[in-house]
Amino acid sequence: MVDAKLRVSFAGPLVTFQDSGRPGHMRYGVSPSGPMDRLSFAAAHRALGNLAEQTCVEISLGGVQLECREGNVSLAVTGGDFSVDHGGQKGGSWCVLTLRQGEKLSIRAGASGSWAYLAFAGELDADTWLGHSATHASSGFGGGAIRSGQMLIVRDARTCPDRIGAIPMFSDIGNEPIRVVIGPQDGHFQKGASHKFVSEPYTLTDAYDRMGMRLTGPKLALNAALSIPSEPIVRGSVQVSGDGGATILLADHQTTGGYPKIATVISCDIDRLVQSRAGQSVKFVAVSANDAIAITRKDAAMRREYLDRVSVPRGTLEQRLLGENLIHGELNT
Amino acid sequence: MKAKFTAIADHALLVQFSTELNDEAHDLVLALDQALSDAPPDGMIEIVPALVNLLVDFDPMVSDHATIEADVRAKLKQLVPASRQGTTHRVPICYEAPFCPDLPAVAQTSGMSEEAVINVHLSGEYRVMMYGFAPGFAYMAGVPGPIQVPRKPTPVRDIPACSVIIAGPQCLITTLVMPTGWSIIGRSTVQTLTGDPDQPFRFDLNDRVQFERIDLTSFDRLTRETVHG
């Protein structure tokens, strides 16, 4: 098999290489990184028959434009509702297509969503750190940021005619409130703060990157003279600074910090949360830790079923038309 | 010392020994960290030890908070002090310009000469208490009282990697270009992120660091040697 080479004619900020992430080093100050929206990342790979741990390109609202210089390669675009322009043919994310030598592909912010994923049928070349290409954006460790002028190389590039077309989307719970478990430092807040957090709407600000998203909304007042020793942080921790403003820490979070945390977003709701954009309203709802586990397990079963469905080739156009018994004389002309 | 357990989201348990900094709590963190590393409960993904508390991250498909808590409680009942004696690392440091922009201010605040500040800093034995904030940021305790200075009110941007910075009793060697409100008193030739896949992080928890003074000429030579491998 041969390699495909794609020139990056344009890449916005925060377009990075990401694999499934590097857990296991938080004790050394290293957050796992990996995709902001883990489900969309997995769907992009599975739609091509790839392993869901491989390297892909995570695309921010800044977008990316590529030109295929050598070879032909099938690719999948998932995540949010981005605009995809394949040599003048316009569509949205959640599709598999084949990019041929000389063709251009542009993926830009569309109607909604903050992160898109571009996976290739083959192995995307990227530097690794601690065994993973996942980019820790603030340090640049891992595969790193993708920049205009760079060449992307897909090893053993394949085309998958039996996978071309739309990728089904996960039927998640849409705009339902984001579920959190209260704590661990809810006791450091003035009475009623955690109730306020889960009963009033917050708005996502443009202070939003791979480290975290800052919210505006009702202030969460801390008890006076507060000083807590630095303690561990996880993806989803909602930390509150001295001015009462909340920040949700995300894929490239710092691993310890001294700000009290009023709540933590449960893992399966983070993919939904990160696709919000600045100015959008977010509501939170409290669940117990036990319910959080039950919710995650149920959600994981649904995700497995969904990803299995995504990974089944749908057949070539001809096979599909035959299967649906839609071949008529005029189509054969 | 009683442990307090707090469930975090659907995938972690925080074990807290104290709400304030103290050695007894930190020793318990180290001992529990070792016990969990030696015999990890089913589903444990990683342990994040901090100053007076420790987080156990687990796979919610395999375990839950109550199961992890029961395992930790059982380990706490028969906890022995961490047996691992930290390694002592000798770390070269150059206190000369342009690596020490805050040395005059530290000298002024502590009411001693710059040379005296350097000697006091060199006299300290530094203990790795915790990693945090950014990859390879090893927080070390042990800055001697006379040169303990508060953080600056405003962080300064673009501080180079390998800067040796201090605030209060803490000292650290930076690993990235970053802003800091700590006082920058020198530069080391040693990278905490080693680039060695077998031992990517130079220090382990509870390791000791002894700084050794080098002049600018030695700094340049050592840096060249590092660059050329």
Image: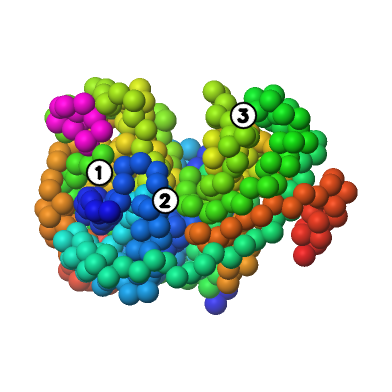
**Residue A93's spot in the image, x, y percent?**
35, 48
Disc 2 crowd rating (10 Å Cα; few below 14, some 14-19, many 20+) is few
Are marks 3 and 1 in one subunit? Answer: no
Q: How far apart, in angstroms, are the residues tagged by discs 3 and 1?
A: 32 Å
Disc 3 crowd rating (10 Å Cα; few below 14, some 14-19, many 20+) is some
Q: Helix, strand, or loop for circle 2?
A: helix
Tell which subunit mark 3 falls on: B
* Type of amino acid under label 3: Val
- What residue sits right under mark 2 in the picture? B23
Disc 1 crowd rating (10 Å Cα; few below 14, some 14-19, many 20+) is many
Residue at figure coordinates x 43%, y 56% from the top left = A26
**Which mark lies nearer to you, 1 or 2?**
2
- What residue sits right under mark 3 in the picture? B156
Label pair 2/3, CB-CB below 8 angstroms: no
- Range shown magenta: A186-197
Q: How far apart, in angstroms, are the residues tagged by discs 2 and 3?
A: 31 Å
The answer to which of marks 2 and 3 sits earlier in the sequence is: 2
